[in-house]
């Protein structure tokens, strides 16, 4: 049983968030927490850590009676989409103007058990064969 957590309108560029998302994609939850803790100098790591905790809480809500430690949770999917862009004008030399784009992003994180993800992968390979 998978659980989803979403982070909308995060005020950083999608490119910066994707750098961390690529590091934790497909990892076990414990490993992902370690990666995010040791990348703490990037402010996005704190946001992704909070999002991961939310996804785990959602998984616990769906699977009452199951323990997170025993189930071997894996980050099945994580993707970062671009969000709204705030546009500003900054004065430039000789009466010109430069546009400043303040980007935001949306992050979607899906957590699932390791056994369920291997079954899904094996089904896809059988269908493609």
Image (cartoon, grey):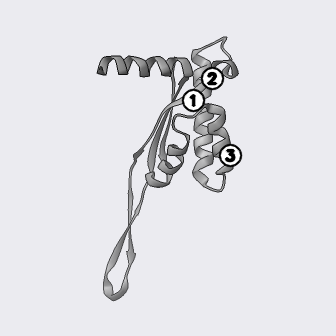
Tag of residue 55: 1
Q: Gap in Å between the C-alphas at discs 2 and 1?
A: 14 Å
Q: How many angstroms separate mark 2 from mark 3 (CA)?
A: 19 Å
63 is higher (above) or lower (below) than 92: above
Q: Earlier in the sequence, mark 1 or mark 3?
A: 3
The mark lying in front, picked from 1 and 3, is: 3
Q: Earlier in the sequence, mark 2 or mark 1?
A: 1
Q: Find the distance from the CA under tag 1 to the CA under tag 3.
A: 17 Å
Q: Looking at the image, which residue is at 36% across and 21% down?
A: 125
Query: Where residue 3 sits in the image (x, y, percent)?
Result: 52, 24
Residue 1 has which mark?
A: none
Which residue is located at x 51 percent, y 38 percent?
25
Q: Which residue is mark 2?
A: 72
Q: Taking 107 as reference, is 34 left or right?
A: right
Circle 1 SS class: helix
Q: Which mark is residue 37?
A: 3
Within-10-Å neighbours for mark 2: few <14, some 14–19, many 20+ = some
């Amino acid at each position: 049983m998978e659980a989803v957590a979403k982070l909308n309108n995060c005020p950083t560029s999608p490119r910066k968030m994707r750098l961390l998302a690529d590091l934790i994609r497909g990892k076990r939850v414990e490993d992902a927490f370690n990666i995010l803790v040791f990348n703490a100098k990037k402010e996005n790591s704190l946001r992704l850590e909070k999002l991961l905790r939310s996804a785990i809480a959602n998984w616990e809500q769906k699977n009452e009676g199951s323990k997170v430690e025993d189930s071997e949770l894996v980050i099945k999917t994580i993707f970062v989409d671009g969000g709204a862009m705030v546009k500003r004008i900054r004065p430039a030399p000789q009466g010109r103007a430069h546009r400043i784009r303040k980007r935001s992003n949306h992050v979607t994180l899906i957590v699932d058990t390791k056994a369920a993800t291997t079954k899904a992968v094996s089904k896809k390979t059988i269908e493609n064969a």
